[in-house]
């Protein structure tokens, strides 16, 4: 772009206000950051530039909005700003967060163990109910053992350093000896976890097996290698090609980890997730999962062989340095897993699938583009431009639908979407109200 044709400062401000959607070339990106630098002045106070930048985001209308939900946020109907709206962004796929049996068991555990564990599992936090949860989790996803942690984020932050880096001196691996190969659209928690490791990071194109194999071939056989992918890519509404990735992992002697946060509980015959869906139990080295989605609670886990779990309990720093999962959560989650694996759980997954199918067909009939192949419950509705997606989500909220814009940097620029998340507890009238609202915004926004 020539100097003569460069956009004005006013134009750049509009670009930023629109969600930085048009920043497709490095020259313009640099121009916008220079503009920001002129508006964030001085260091008169030790964090003044932070505060001024936050104020700038608010002024330009690009700061994220955190709506206050005044009721249980996992239910189909919620209260926001005193108004009843329909919730279509909760990951409570099976509706277990307020299941009466789950609440009962959580209450019993609360009475026995109190609110928190008082420390890490290395200290006083290794309460007996956590061993039960570890065992139930491993059985759910088909591994020998599992290490449970307070959040899914902590699980992903913990695992890469523990598996790829030296713990003492040069053991078990030298610093920087390993290579982590990660799908380009892996969750941000995976990205953060990889950054904490000394291992080399190699990104392969999303679900591109030929690109993954090409990059595996370039790595010497003697290096310690790990491939990480998600089982279900929720913004893309699709599975990873796990059978083929498993074969590549065997061929190149690679540690394989699957982040199945959106698969566990929601897919698979007994809710075992994407690994079970593809009949790959026992063929994935590490299954990472989350308790706060289909299981309705909070927390994360790393499921593996007994030997690897034994190593993770010592080498995964959050397991040593952070408080353990609380007993009240463990009590509720053990019951959630029981329901998930039962006939009731199968019926809930069937209803979840039926709700998702109904939405996809109806959205297609309305002329919307649905991202993905329709194999997973998440139903991302493609919008495109970030500014339009943000305004559309705001208009949906006016019409009684809460489903925020899912946009850059979570997805590539210009590919924003409304990630509609159905639950088994949504009734047909809820789904029809959602579709009616989308029909209205389609006409108003000329989609």
Image: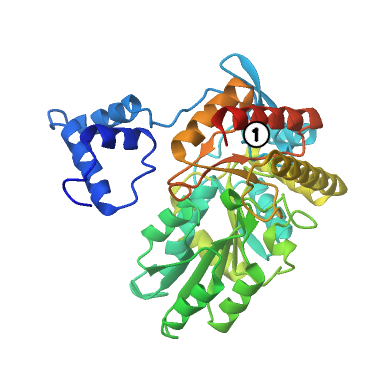
Residue 43, relative to residue 27: is it above or below?
Answer: above
Q: Is residue 68 left or right of residue 46?
A: right
Residue 224, relative to residue 289: is it above or below?
Answer: below
Q: Residue furthest front?
A: 4
Question: Dot 1 lies on which element?
Answer: loop
Q: Residue 4 appears in which quarter of the rendering?
A: top left
Q: Is residue 17 left or right of residue 327?
A: left
Q: Where residue 401 sits in the image (x, y, percent)? A: 63, 27
Q: Where residue 31 sits in the image (x, y, percent)? A: 21, 44
Residue 427, relative to residue 122: is it above or below?
Answer: above
Asked if one can make out residue 70 in the rendered structure from this viewpoint, the answer is no
Q: Quadrant of the C terminus?
A: top right
Q: Residue 202 appears in which quarter of the rendering?
A: bottom left
Q: Residue at x 68, y 63 (%)?
A: 275
Disc 1 packing (10 Å; few <14; some 14–19; many ≥20):
many
Q: Residue at x 80, y 51 (%)?
A: 341
Q: Residue at x 49, y 71 (%)?
A: 226
Q: Where residue 297 sits in the image (x, y, percent)? A: 64, 40
Q: Nearer the viewer, residue 270 or 56?
A: 56
Residue 355, relative to residue 266: is it above or below?
Answer: above
Q: Where residue 147 sits in the image (x, y, percent)? A: 59, 56
Asked if one can make out residue 200 in the rendered structure from this viewpoint, the answer is yes
Q: Residue furthest bottom?
A: 221
Q: Which residue is mark 1?
A: 88
Q: Nearer the viewer, residue 430 or 367?
A: 367
């Amino acid at each position: 772009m020539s100097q003569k044709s460069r956009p004005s400062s006013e134009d750049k401000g509009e670009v930023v206000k629109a969600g930085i959607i048009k920043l497709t070339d490095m020259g313009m990106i640099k121009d916008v950051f220079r503009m920001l630098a002129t508006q964030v002045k001085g260091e008169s106070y030790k964090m003044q530039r932070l505060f001024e930048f936050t104020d700038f985001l608010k002024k330009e209308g690009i700061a994220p909005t955190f709506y206050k939900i005044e009721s249980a946020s996992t239910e189909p109907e919620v209260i926001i700003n005193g108004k009843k709206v329909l919730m279509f962004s909760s990951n409570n796929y099976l509706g277990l967060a307020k299941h009466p049996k789950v609440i009962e068991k959580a209450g019993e555990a609360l009475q026995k163990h109190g609110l928190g564990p008082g420390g890490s599992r290395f200290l006083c936090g290794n309460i007996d109910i956590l061993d039960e949860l570890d065992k139930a989790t491993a059985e759910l996803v088909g591994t020998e053992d599992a290490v449970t942690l307070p959040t899914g984020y902590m699980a992903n932050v913990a695992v890469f350093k523990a598996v790829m880096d030296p713990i003492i001196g040069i053991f078990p691996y030298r610093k920087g000896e390993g290579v982590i190969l990660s799908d380009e659209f892996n969750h941000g928690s995976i990205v953060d976890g990889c950054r904490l490791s000394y291992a080399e990071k190699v990104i392969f194109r999303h679900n591109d097996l030929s690109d993954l194999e090409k990059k595996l071939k370039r790595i010497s056989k003697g290096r310690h290698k790990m491939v990480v992918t998600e089982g279900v890519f929720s913004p893309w509404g699709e599975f990873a090609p796990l059978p083929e990735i498993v074969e590549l992992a065997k061929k190149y002697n690679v540690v394989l980890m699957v982040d199945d946060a959106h698969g566990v509980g929601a897919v698979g015959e007994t809710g075992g997730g994407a690994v079970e869906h593809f009949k790959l139990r026992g063929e994935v080295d590490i299954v990472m999962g989350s308790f706060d989605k289909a299981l309705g609670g909070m927390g994360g886990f790393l499921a593996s062989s007994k030997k690897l779990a034994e190593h993770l309990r010592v080498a995964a720093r959050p397991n040593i340095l952070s408080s353990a999962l609380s007993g009240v959560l463990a009590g509720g989650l053990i019951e959630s897993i029981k329901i998930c694996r039962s006939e009731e759980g199968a019926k809930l997954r069937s209803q979840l699938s039926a709700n998702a199918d109904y939405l996809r067909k109806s959205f297609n009939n309305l002329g919307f583009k649905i991202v993905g192949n329709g194999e997973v419950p998440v139903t991302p509705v493609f919008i495109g431009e970030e500014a339009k997606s943000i305004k559309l989500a705001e208009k949906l909220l006016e019409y009684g639908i809460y489903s925020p814009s899912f946009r850059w940097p979570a997805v590539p620029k210009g590919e924003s979407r409304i990630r509609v998340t159905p639950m088994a507890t949504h009734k047909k009238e809820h789904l029809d109200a959602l579709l009616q609202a989308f029909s209205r915004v389609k006409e108003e926004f000329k989609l």
